[in-house]
Each structure stands twice: as C-alpha cells, then as structure tokens.
Amino acid sequence: MRVLGIETSCDETGVAVYDTEAGILGQALHSQIAMHARHGGVVPELASRDHIQRLIPLVEQVMAEAQLAPTDIDGIAYTAGPGLAGALLVGASAARTLAFGWGVPALAVHHMEGHLLAPLLEDDAPTFPFVALLVSGGHTQLLDARGLGDYHLLGESLDDAAGEAFDKAAKMMGLGYPGGPIISALAEHGDPERFTFPRPMTDRPGLDFSFSGLKTYCLNTIAACGGAAALSDQDRADIARAFEEAVVETLVIKCRRAMQQTGHGSLVMAGGVSANRRLRARLAEALGSGTRALAPVRVCYPRPQLCTDNGVMIAFAGALRMAAGEQQQDLGIAVRARWPLSELQPVAG
Ligand code: ATP
Ligand code: MG
Ligand code: FE
C-alpha cells in the first residue's frame, strides 16, 4: 500500500509518500512562518492562497524525487480537519481531484491522529494500547489510545494549548515566532533558581490542564524586571527557564497520573512541543525507571521534523487506514475546522 499524503491545515504545506513495506519514499515541506511573521500571527486568507501556489509543485517535486508515477500510488490521504477551513479546503480539493484523475481512492485524515501516529514511524515502535500526550500549537490532550481510531480523552487544556503558551510567552518578551524553540534555546542559559512559576492544576486530582495563568505570571515577572524593553539577555533566559520548567513539570505530573490510571506500559507523545528536549529528558527521568507506585514506562516520540506539521504523518495515517480497508466512497469534499479526535470510530482489522 503506497499512499500520497497532503497536509494543509494551518501554515505548513506538507506532501509525502509512505509505503507500508518500504516506509517513507519521499517528502517535502513548505513553511509559511516567514510570510506570516510580519503580521504577528497566521493570517488565514494568506495561508490558503499560499497553499494553492505551493501544493501542486510540491506534489510534483516529491513524486519526481521518489521516481514515482501516478500509477505507483494506491491512494491519497489528506488532512480534513481540524484546522483553518480555507487552508483545509485547498488540500482536500487538490487531493480529491488528483485521486479522481489518477483513479485511486481518497481518504480524509484527522490532523491530530496524524500527530498521534507519527511516533509509530520510528524504529521499535510501540503497539496499542498506549497513552498519548498530544502537545501542539492548538492542542494539549492526554488520550487512552486503544487501537487505530479508538481514542478516549483522559484530559485536556481548559484554555491555552502548551505550544500556544510558549508562543505567547515569547511574544511578551519581544521574541519571534514560533516561541517554543526560541524559549527552549534561551532556557539553556537560564538560572533555574531565580524565578519559580506555578504548576497549574497539579494540586487537584484529574488530568486536565490550564496554561493561561502562566501567561499572567510571565507578564508580572517581566513587569517586575522593568518591562519587556528593559529585559537583559540574562533576564530573558531566566524567565524562559522558569516558564519552560513550569510547563514541563506540569506535563510530567499529569503524564505520571495518566500512566497510573490506565496501567499502560507506553507513553507516546507528539505535536510540536514534543520536540522539547527538557520535556523528553524529564519524562524519561520521571517515568523510565519506575517507582513503587508505577512500573517503568516506555516514552516514545517522533524525530524532531515529524513533531511539527508534515505530510509524512498524514500519508502514514492514511496508509494504516487504507491497509485496514478504509476508503472514502463519494466524491464530496468535506472539511471540519473543529473535530474532536474521540469522534473517530475504531478501525477493524
Ligand atoms: P495543532 O496540531 O494543534 O493544530 P499546530 O499544527 O500549529 O497545532 P504543531 O505544528 O504541531 O502545532 O506545533 C507547533 C507548536 O509547537 C508551536 O506552538 C511551537 O512553539 C511549539 N514548539 C515547537 N518546537 C518546540 C520546542 N522545542 N519546545 C516547545 N515548544 C515547541
Ligand atoms: Mg504550523
Ligand atoms: Fe499540528
């Protein structure tokens, strides 16, 4: 089963071909970050127009580099949601049209299922069931993943997503976008003793998160240092360190609880924030060797390029589903800007 995957849910145009026998045959990604930067955030209309210009050339590039002809492709998977409606429509119509032209099935893929399955692209991949921590720009969720399409929400953020919190903290300090990698790099030189930020919602039971309070804490700390314009490089590094530790420790505490609650032996994490090095190290430290209350947990995540949006994860999710016999029957193009992952149905097979 060889599947072309198309991702256009936000500000990345991603294209890839995944083969269930041979693995990733080709991939290409165009990021719109530089284009949106001067507007201070993603402008949906600009995003859609850019996807229109980039998508077909990227498909041609990936097919040429992998030396593939349309007859080598068994199906086309595209992100149908959640995301920006206009951006999703570009990928969905292109995928549906190509599939019609090439005479192969098309399949609508859930963007967050793509993220969730990406760690399974790595060697020695875990098998279901496992706990999934999805930490991206728009989502912070813990799920009990029992099988393909069989995802049960254990907890989620009641306000900002973890990645969004990183982005907003960076903006407050006058740093660029996306904030996650910038804060993370700065935090390396930060003094962990200077500031301590709260670990929101860890003082009560449950697996939900809240990251919006950290924003206020960050803002007050910046004000106490004389305002964003007065921050020294060391101030920025110290704030970044305290902020990152607060987010990471909060995620670690909730992950430990989720492992205890489910009894699963593996934790899979995905989404842009799963690229965070401190998060990876702390999870391995806190869960890897086990305690009296918790058996050792295997922590799995994708290589850094597959943490953020990409076409590979969509091709992969589509290939797994098509290999299990699924395909879209009609020629309709339906996208869903909002689409809870737990609405998917378990895939038999
Ligand atoms: P969603 O998948 O929820 O629709 P998205 O696709 O915009 O959102 P991703 O592309 O998965 O999100 O991830 C982008 C986010 O990851 C940004 O908020 C970015 O700041 C964050 N991020 C990327 N690298 C790191 C890092 N090393 N540390 C922390 N955060 C990071
Ligand atoms: Mg993005
Ligand atoms: Fe994403």
Image (cartoon, rainbow, N blue to C red):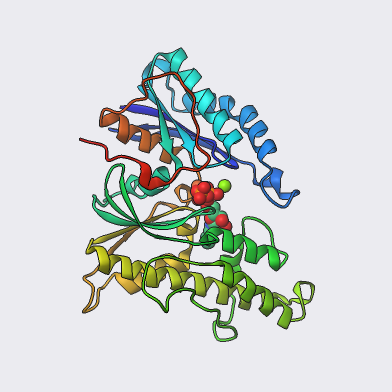
Residue lying at the far bottom in this picture: please name it: 193
Quadrant assignment for the N terminus: top left
Residue lying at the far right in this picture: please name it: 229
- Give the camera-side residue of 146 and 273: 146
Q: Is residue 85 left or right of residue 228?
A: left
Which of the 4 image quadrants contains residue 280? bottom left
How many discs mark residues in the rendered view?
0
| Residue 61 in picture, x, y percent from top left | 53, 27
**Residue 188 visible within the image:** no
| Residue 254 in picture, x, y percent from top left | 38, 69
- Give the camera-side residue of 72 and 128: 128
Residue drawn where x is 48% and y is 76% of the image: 199
Residue drawn where x is 52% and y is 59% of the image: 161
| Residue 35 in picture, x, y percent from top left | 70, 43
Quadrant assignment for the C terminus: top left
Residue drawn where x is 70% and y is 68% of the image: 173
| Residue 272 in picture, x, y percent from top left | 50, 54
- Give the camera-side residue of 233 and 38: 38
**Residue 337 visible within the image:** yes
Q: Is residue 275 left or right of residue 13?
A: left
Which of the 4 image quadrants contains residue 229? bottom right
Tell me if residue 326 comes above or below residue 72 in the rendering: below
Residue drawn where x is 58% and y is 82% of the image: 191
Which of the 4 image quadrants contains residue 103? top left
